Amino acid sequence: MGDRLPKFKAAAVQASAVFLDREASVEKACRLIEEAARNGAKLIALPEVFIPGGPYWAWYLGLRKGLPFSSELYLNSVEVPSETTAVIGALAQRYGCHVVIGVNERDNKTIYNTLLFFDGAGNLLGKHRKLKATGAEKLVWGEGDGSTHRVYATELGRLGGLICGEHAQVLPGFTLAAMGEQIHIASWVGFAVADTTLTEICTRYHAIAYNCFVICTQSVVDPSISQRIGVDLVPGGAWTAIVEAGSGRVIAGPLAPTEEGIVYADIDLNQAVPHYFLHESTGHYWPKQFQVHFDARELKPLHVRRDAHEPGDALREGAAESASA
């Protein structure tokens, strides 16, 4: 009989965040997850920084004028773990579905652009921090490191993801593929400074080059954002679809760029197998003259080394020795 690879229904959400409102964005995310789960989805993907939206002000207002909005984003960001992650995990467990959602992650005094991965038991499998913020977004977000760039082995298959402009870099996608990625989450924020053909081209390329099914989810630029930050943004800016592994064929979606909704597709990982023999770029179609050396360490600003005695004990011992002398 041999092996049979998993089959399941996937869902890609296209919707706007409730801008700069963490609690309302979580509530909206839960409604969308519940809707997708009730429609039979076992993998549900929501857009980049869906909680609580993207820093559009950075592209137009600069650092100084944008600080009030950046500060508000900080106060509405998500700590990991927290009550917010517990709520999403509980919903994933209730419906037995995997959930991938983008959040602004607050860690100490820095915000990161982060994807969170939950399994069907509600466990937080891990996170992917965007490795390098794009353009003006560097005024708001910190950089990730190799410790959160990985593929998760799940009952649905080997699951990974990238965020927005990371898809325009070759090595992040290639390294996920080399880790054995079978299902890829392409997570994007609604475009106010680019064209959605970028989303489509990068998404379909990943599916072709790396023989992955790609669940592409992009948020909608809501007109209320323009009113809030005082900048005239083009509404919409979304391209949400599900793309077939190997061929790059769109098998669900896209929705209209201003429309909120969910697209669904049945994923059969067995259908990707014939494409392995055409162009498996991290295996027999890999030109061995080119190799990637990847640093998977967690990079920290502070490393605390503890010796046999605590520092306080050493000081006390030194004082005692001086007194006895």
Image (cartoon, rainbow, N blue to C red):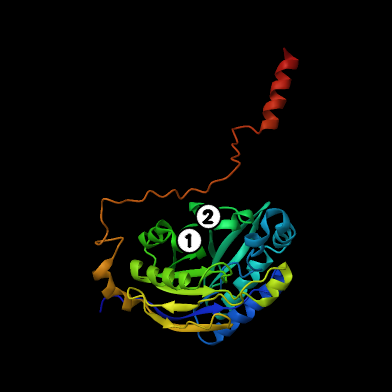
The N terminus appears in which quarter of the rendering? bottom left
- The answer to the question of whether label 1 and label 2 lie on touching residues, with beta carbons closer than 8 A, is yes
When asked about the image quadrant of residue 278, the answer is bottom left
Where is residue 9 shown, x and y percent of the image?
45, 82
Tell me the kind of residue under disc 2: Lys
The extreme top residue here reads: 325
The extreme front residue here reads: 232
The extreme bottom residue here reads: 39
Between 295 and 206, the one nearer to me in the picture: 206
Where is residue 16 shown, x and y percent of the image?
62, 76
The C terminus appears in which quarter of the rendering? top right
| Residue at (72, 53) in percent of width and height | 64
Q: Disc number at residue 227?
A: none
Where is residue 150 shown, x and y percent of the image?
45, 59
Tell me the kind of residue under disc 1: Glu
**Comes first in the chain, label 1 or label 2:** 2
How packed is label 1: few (under 14 Cα within 10 Å), some, or many (20 or more)? many
- Asked if 261 appears above or below 47 in the picture, the reply is below
Total count of labels: 2
* Residue 80 visible to the viewer: no
Q: Disc number at residue 132?
A: 2
Disc 2 is placed on an element classified as loop
State the residue position of label 1: 166
Where is residue 307 shown, x and y percent of the image?
59, 33
Disc 1 is placed on an element classified as helix
